[in-house]
Image: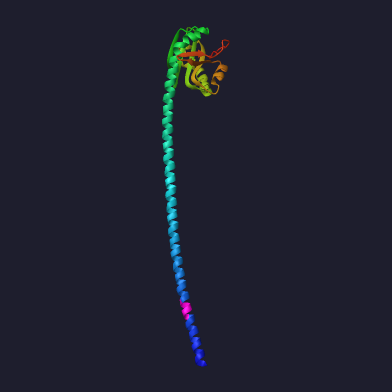
Amino acid sequence: MNETHDKAIAEIWQLIRETQAEIKETQAEIEKLAQESKESSHRVDEKLAESSRRADAAIENFAKESKESSQRTDRKIRQLAGVFDHQWGRFIEALVRPNALKLFQERGIKIKYTFQRVTGQLNGHNMELDVVLVNDSELVIIEVKSKLGVQEVRDFLEDLTTVRAIFPQYRGYRVYGGVAGLEIVEEADKFAYRQGLFVLEVVGRGMIAIKNDVSFQPKNFE
């Protein structure tokens, strides 16, 4: 009985030891797998982080290059627009000058001489008059724009107040103003009319007309 009991106990202990060994082995395997999983996860995180950094860098670089490209394009467009405006301005001036003499004579202003691009300076302030029409006592200054808006009219009105100071040879003259534009926006023509300015427009091939009605009384910009 004792022998059988001792044998059973021995077998149980052997089973326990084997089970413990298997448990340790299993735990070791689990720990190994967990470590490998952790390392793998860490590598994945590193790869994801690196991919994210590369993507961010690529996006930032693309945005920078796009901005620089856009700025270069904007500069070129502004340069081309400036050339375009300048050339159209010269073209309109060439139309206004030969037609203006007859047009203003018909309005009772007996123009004798016409000049184009008259320049003057006073105390560092430069002024260029696009088209100048003059007789012995009257002066008509015409501002020419390829695109005429309200702000361009305002700027011209301000210039008219300094004409006599910059061009003293016209002191004592009645000074009238006029604006001409290939394209007139913001109802700048109506605004100019209310300010006492003549408004000229291109009405046909090589033809310029005064839009103001015959009852219009120009302002003398003294």
| Front residue of this view, candidates 168 and 77 | 77
Say which residue appears at 54% left-offset and 21% top-offset.
188
| Front residue of this view, candidates 215 and 17 | 17
Please say whether residue 122 is visible from this viewpoint.
no
Which secondary structure is most common in the magenta stretch? helix
Tell me if residue 35 comes above or below residue 162 in the rendering: below
Residue 118, x across and y down, in percent: 43, 15
| Front residue of this view, candidates 131 and 124 | 131
Left/right placement of residue 152 relative to residue 72 reads right
Say which residue appears at 43% left-offset and 56% top-offset.
46
Q: Residue furthest bottom?
A: 1
Would you identify the image quadrant in which residue 69 lies? top left
Would you identify the image quadrant in which residue 72 lies? top left
Tell me if residue 50 comes above or below residue 178 in the rendering: below
Residue 92, x across and y down, in percent: 45, 17
Tell me if residue 55 comes above or below residue 182 in the rendering: below
In the image, the segment drawn in magenta is: 17-21
Asked if the magenta segment contains residue 15, the reply would be: no
Residue 164, x across and y down, in percent: 49, 14
Say which residue appears at 50% left-offset and 90% top-offset.
4
Residue 47, x across and y down, in percent: 42, 55
